[in-house]
Amino acid sequence: MSLEKMGQAAREAAYQLATVSTAQKNRALAAIADELEARSAQILAANEKDIAAGREAGLSEAMLDRLLLNPARLAGIVADVRKVITLDDPVGAEIDSRVLENGLRLSRRRVPIGVIGVIYEARPNVTIDIASLCLKTGNASILRGGRETFHSNLELVRVIQSALAASGLPEAAVQYIDNPDRALVGELLRLDRYVDMIIPRGGAGLHKMCKENSSIPVIIGGFGISHIFVDESADLARALPLIDNAKVQRPSACNALDTLLVHEKIAERLLPQLVSLMNERKVALVATPEAMPLLAGAEQLRAAGAEDFDTEWLSLTLGIKLVADVNEALAHMREHNAGHSDAILTNDLANAERFVNGAGSAAVYVNASTRFTDGGQFGLGAEVAVSTQMLHARGPMGLTELTSYKWVGQADYLSRA
């Protein structure tokens, strides 16, 4: 496999996509959605091979859940593609404009970034998410999925390229590195002659590797310990089902709750009720010493170790710590990798504002579950990643975040004095 040739083909495809109309891009997206439905049996059969191989390799249940495609999840992926069709195309839109004193009308116009390289692990839905959002924004993409999703991804890319060809668009607009050789990842990270941005989707190790080895700008995201702080003023009866939702609704998701911070003044009322609920849900609790006596009825309970509050559980495990106030909650979050999705449950407006302003997270919630950090939930359609860096884009990256801009100056044969 020659990544140099893939890069060249992707760059040429990006040049073509930059001038394609919104209508033609939408027709290609509709063709992808139709083809996904028509070939659902083949896609699910390919995914079954990956699931079987994953079980044989001893993958955790959390990883297998990320890998799994079933009819409902595939239908959700198709719906996401069709949702992207309905969204406004940001390419060509003017961000702002003004007329200078010399008569030059100066504006900023949204343009595609160019070629996006995406390195991801056991999430086959990412293949379709990336393809659809990049296509809508006129970007070409080079994808490199994990070996766990090999058969699923190959089948999905065949669907995408078939739909592109049928729609009159270059198949090289979406390419897949199907060789499992890890050396190719390093080669992709240095393909700066053709690739404009790298998006890793996976664990902290993948992000660290990309950041340290890439000669291409890297969007860091998808990892971070998610916290909920239950303030002294919170409505505990309403807080419990929200905590349950954040932890249990899909525990393998990157925005699922990892650590519950509880105001010490309400801990004696909240934690025994929480124990009953978490026992029903088969959630294991990991707690600091001062919280342990209040969790005595837990069926699965152990003392927190040195690294536990830095662990993204991705499973039915929940860390619990008591804090004195919102400031101590924020201090804990700063120390323990908050940056993704964090929430405060409170009826105190001042504490809510203190939390929102003090949390460095990409998404911060007041009286809402952390599980909302998602492109679909935010009305963006599918997302390419959840960015937790401070530059360019933060939170779910939808269409707008896959564009840059150019300055456009218009005048009547104006020369500079």
Image: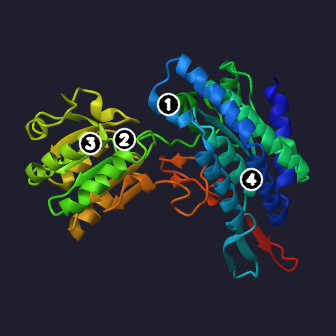
Q: Which mark is residue 33?
A: 4
Q: Which residue is mark 1?
A: 63
Q: Which residue is mark 2?
A: 225
Q: Could you tell me residue 86's position as x and y percent?
A: 69, 67
Amino acid type of the residue tagged 1 in the rendering = Met
Label 2, residues with CA under 10 Å away: few <14, some 14-19, many ≥20: many
Label 1, residues with CA under 10 Å away: few <14, some 14-19, many ≥20: many
Q: Tag 2, which secondary structure?
A: loop
The answer to which of 177 and 197 lies nearer the viewer is 177
Number of labelled discs?
4
* Of pointers 3 and 2, the one earlier in the residue sequence: 2
Q: Is residue 144 visible?
A: no
Amino acid type of the residue tagged 4 in the rendering = Ala
Label 4, residues with CA under 10 Å away: few <14, some 14-19, many ≥20: many
Q: Residue at x 75, y 35 (%)?
A: 155
Judge depth for marks 2 and 4 and give the one in front.
Answer: 4
Q: Could you tell me residue 43's position as x and y percent?
A: 71, 37
State the CA–CA distance, disc 2 to disc 4: 34 Å
Label 3, residues with CA under 10 Å away: few <14, some 14-19, many ≥20: few
Q: Which mark is residue 128?
A: none
State the CA–CA distance, disc 1 to disc 4: 26 Å
* Of pointers 3 and 4, the one earlier in the residue sequence: 4
* Of pointers 2 and 4, the one earlier in the residue sequence: 4
